Image (tube, rainbow, N blue to C red):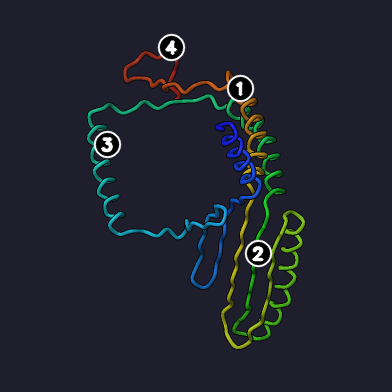
Amino acid sequence: MIGWILLALLALLILLSLVLRLGVLACYDGDGPWVKLRLGPRYIQVFPIRKDPDREAKKKQKKAAKDAQKAAKQGDKPPKEPVERDIGGLLELIWDLLPVVAEAASRFRHKLRIDDLTLQVTWAEEDPADTGIHYGQGWAVIEALLAFLEANFTIKNRQVALYADFLTEKPRIYVRAGLSMTPAQLLGIALPAGVRALKVLWDHRHTIKPARPKRQEKKGEANHGKQSSCQ
């Protein structure tokens, strides 16, 4: 019986990984920007952060107490010696990791889906003639942007509009974009990239030298016959 329950739970997890979508929803309007994280059917606002005044005051008190304790401890300890690191091996590691990152980014771009793309622009300027000219140029920019997005991403819903307002002097813009992908797609990108990155790190395990204290010449120390560069 327990085996069947575990099997059912495993099947449910696989189904959720194929159906559940994770992503982000961002918007900008006259009131400013806001960003929400998408976890399936639920959205959690992450910007702007809603702050609790009492909670913020407690955080500031705790931070001030920690800073005071840290300053007291550092006063009793001698200053740390500067360290030096051989960055030659680190540069080679970054160079070998670049293809892994590029491939992961390409796969991420093809799997990412634009669920909602809304763009509404009302163009207005002080001079009505400039409004008309820039209105036509705006459509050319929007069409080029849409061509790029459609060539590189899958767009589910799209609403794009550009208006000209000859009675006002300031343009208005409303942008909303929702991006998402399934956990299975995310794992399909992260696991192969992680394996390749671990292989590169293993191959470079001996090339990166650990940091060591930088030797400082003490005052009055012999220079072993070397002449100073200062005249």
Quadrant of the snapshot with the C terminus: top left
Q: Secondary structure at mark 4?
A: loop
Q: Secondary structure at mark 3?
A: helix
Q: Residues under labels 1 and 2: Cα distance?
A: 42 Å
Q: Nearer the viewer, residue 209 or 45?
A: 45
Q: Return the disc, 1 or 2, that comes first in the chain's sequence.
A: 2
Q: Residue tagged by mark 3?
A: 70
Q: Residues under labels 4 and 3: Cα distance?
A: 44 Å
- Residue 41 appears at what percent x and percent y? 56, 57
The answer to whether residue 222 is left or right of residue 111 is left
- Residue 176 appears at what percent x and percent y? 60, 65
- Residue 221 appears at what percent x and percent y? 34, 15
Q: Residues under labels 2 and 4: Cα distance?
A: 73 Å
Query: Which disc is residue 202 wearing?
Result: 1
Query: Which disc is residue 225 wearing?
Result: 4
Asked if residue 64 is positioned above or below residue 34 in the image, the reply reads above
Identify the amino acid type marked 2: Leu
Query: Is the residue marked by circle 4 packed among few (<14), some (14-19), or many (20+) residues within 10 Å?
Result: few
